[in-house]
């Protein structure tokens, strides 16, 4: 039976410590030896994940990716990349339940979607294009009104 090669060392550059059980990092660099069930098993996470399993979302996602199959972020710098994610420009968990379907969407590749998600943690909601627009939570109602004109 084939075996999988594993690297027992921390993935932080220059670190020689053994990695933690549930991470590629050692405990010193933020790895975890104990699985955090509260973080991954809370009801709010289950509820938000369930929204992505509805036929309404699957239809909306399919329409978005068929109309805009390329990553909007990569396209702004002249790179052609297939989009795999449909991004809510305004993160609905921060705006409210209505923003799950009443939102602006953009197609993004995995890497660009991760970058945008990190921006959202600091309150910047980026819409890629020409020009790229950075919104805040206060801009939601105005942007939605402008989109429905």
Image (cartoon, rainbow, N blue to C red):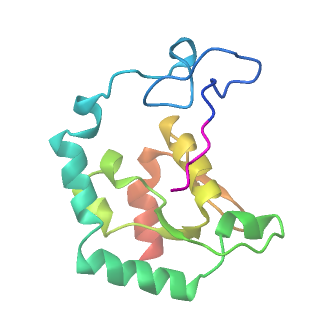
State the residue lying farthest toward the left.
Answer: 43
Counting from the top left corner in percent of width and height, residue 64 is at: 48, 81
Q: As rendered, which of 130 and 119 lies closer to the eye?
A: 119
- Name above or below for residue 44 compared with residue 144: above
Residue 54 is left or right of residue 64, and the answer is left
Counting from the top left corner in percent of width and height, residue 148 is at: 41, 77
Q: Residue at x 40, y 52 (%)?
A: 91
Q: Quadrant of the C terminus?
A: bottom left
Q: As rendered, which of 19 and 32 lies closer to the eye?
A: 19
State the residue lying farthest toward the front.
Answer: 1
Q: Residue at x 24, y 64 (%)?
A: 51
Q: As rendered, which of 55 and 95 lies closer to the eye?
A: 55
- Name above or below for residue 43 compared with residue 25: below
Counting from the top left corner in percent of width and height, residue 117 is at: 52, 47
State the residue lying farthest toward the right.
Answer: 78
Counting from the top left corner in percent of width and height, residue 16 is at: 69, 15
Whether the magenta-drawn stretch holds residue 49 is answered as no
Numbered range of the magenta stretch:
1-6
Determine the main secondary structure of the stretch shown in magenta. loop
Residue 76 is left or right of residue 106, and the answer is right
| The quarter of the displayed image where residue 36 is located | top left
Q: Residue at x 65, y 70 (%)?
A: 71
Q: Residue at x 25, y 80 (%)?
A: 55
- Name above or below for residue 13 compared with residue 111: above
Residue 111 is left or right of residue 91, and the answer is right
Residue 4 is left or right of residue 143, and the answer is right
| The quarter of the displayed image where residue 77 is located | bottom right
């Amino acid at each position: 039976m084939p075996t999988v090669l594993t690297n027992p060392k921390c993935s932080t550059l220059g670190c020689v410590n053994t990695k933690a059980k549930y991470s590629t990092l050692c405990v010193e660099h933020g790895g975890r030896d104990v699985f955090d069930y509260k973080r991954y098993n809370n009801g709010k996470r289950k509820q938000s994940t369930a929204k992505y399993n509805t036929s309404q979302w699957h239809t909306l996602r399919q329409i978005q990716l068929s109309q805009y199959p390329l990553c909007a972020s990569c396209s702004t710098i002249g790179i052609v990349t297939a989009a795999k994610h449909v991004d809510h420009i305004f993160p609905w968990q921060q705006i409210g339940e209505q923003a799950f379907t009443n939102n602006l969407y953009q197609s993004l590749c995995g890497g660009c979607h991760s970058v945008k998600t990190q921006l959202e943690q600091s309150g910047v909601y980026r819409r890629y294009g020409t020009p790229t627009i950075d919104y805040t939570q206060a801009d939601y109602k105005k942007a939605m009104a402008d989109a429905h004109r």
